[in-house]
Amino acid sequence: MRRRRHDEREEWVSDALVFFGATGDLAYKQIFPALYGLVRDEGLSTPIIGVAKQGWGLDQLKQRAADSVKAHGGDITSEAFNKLLSQLRYVDGDYADPNVFTELRKQMGDAQRPLHYLAIPPVLFSEVASQLAKSGCSKNARLVVEKPFGRDRASAEALSRILDEYFSEDDIFRIDHYLGKEPVQNILYTRFANSTFEPIWNRNFVRSIQITMAENFGVQDRGAFYDEAGAIRDVLQNHMLQILASLTMDPPTGQEHEAIRDSKASLLKSVRALDAGHVVRGQYIGYESVPGVRPGSTVETFAAARLAIDSWRWEGVPIFIRTGKVMPVSIAEAVVQFKKPPRETFGEIDSLGCGHMRFRIQPDVTIALGTRVKIPGDRMIGDDVELILTRQPGADRPPYQRLLGDAMHGISDLFTREDIVDAEWRIVNDVLGDVTPVYRYEPGTWGPDEALQLVGGDGPWLNPKPA
């Protein structure tokens, strides 16, 4: 597997990849396609050991891998896929059984620096981490853990204490797959690779910021899971706050490899904690009929919030974020709206045009600049137009491929850190659960009308449109 340099810092490469939950839904949808990509594109050649309690054998795991890779557009007749199959190993059994981890150590062969990926519910983390330590499998190891990192601030702190018993913080990689998306990284790059934007990226020029993450489908077959989570825990607390941090953090300073995460942590620690008056929750009509959803459930499938950042740069700038299921389109984007010029030179008092910068995150990658231009003719009047600075198709390289490759090399930039996770939970902790009403909304709409009250005179909500 090729080595990569990061800030002039050489990192050792993990020599085995172990993933717990190998027969699960996440493995099928994300991990097998990522492993196939790593073998094909980056020459991954280490043993790959799946661990699960399913009563399977290695042949069944290989068939699962074939089904997954084929379903996600991979070529299962290729040399790369055959190589992946040759690297696969499988250990079946209960995570509480020490014999499972004895067998795991055997399947790892000569590997001395494994990467363990816990694609399992957090309630199992303690048992698995403990068994890894007792069996010697945690020595010189890295640990990748899948979100959710707790259900609230207290449980996240407890989870961190458990992991810290067996692994150092430098060796713990908390996956938020949104950080592996090319468009999210593009926000940081566009901001800090150009001198054009940063001078106006502050309270003196920015009127407001809006972030929308919409899906045009419901919870589908995830009813039981979703009814334990809801939109705030599932999306707002992690993905959306990470986008907010990328949009508003200060430039990273120095050559220290933690500089980007330090800047994100500083920003998130300055975001004011939400209260009930700044959040609107909604639930689409028909949610309660989804299998796994409790009768009378008050779990939100829509959440909107008004945020504030207590910093010199962003003092007084309102920030609006919203996410929801069964909305008109599946789209995620952020819009930074600029203030009007200090004087209406041309007397267009009623004009709302003040310019904006738009970052489309999915399904395509778009950066656009809104501006006002003169309409041809004798009168000095204008119209709002948008200049597309770049438009690209969605990146072919899946986020999990990028993230697992980075974890193998010990590159932590695109993973969340313990203090960042704590800051995110602090922001939402007081609005979890039934602290605000849940308003019903029709499928195919932009959520309940009550969300309009959040934006007030700083609105309206900017509804994204497909390209």
Image (cartoon, rainbow, N blue to C red):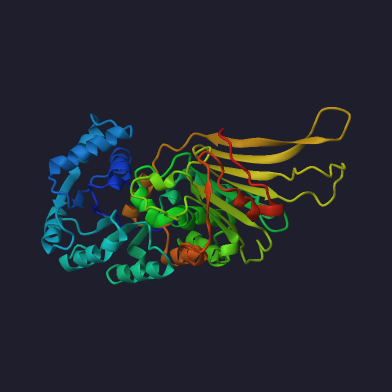
Q: Position of residue 314 (x, y in %)?
A: 65, 61
Question: The C terminus lies in which quarter of the figure?
Answer: top right
Q: Residue at x 59, y 57 (%)?
A: 248
Viewer-proximal residue among 318 and 430: 430
Viewer-proximal residue among 392 and 447: 447
Q: Is residue 418 above or below residue 28?
A: below
Q: Is residue 396 above or below residue 158?
A: above
Numbered circles on residues, count:
0
Q: Is residue 256 above or below residue 234?
A: below
Q: Residue at x 88, y 32 (%)?
A: 379
> Is residue 255 at all visible to an observer of this figure?
no
Q: Does residue 150 appear left or right of residue 189 in this picture?
A: left
Q: Does residue 221 appear left or right of residue 338 in this picture?
A: left
Q: Position of residue 407 (x, y in %)?
A: 34, 54
Extreme residue toward the front, this view: 296
Viewer-proximal residue among 32 and 413: 32
Q: Position of residue 45 (x, y in %)?
A: 23, 45
Q: Quadrant of residue 67?
A: top left
Extreme residue toward the top, this view: 377
Q: Residue at x 23, y 65 (%)?
A: 127
Q: Position of residue 115 (x, y in %)?
A: 27, 56
Viewer-proximal residue among 89 and 21: 21
> Is residue 294 at all visible to an observer of this figure?
yes
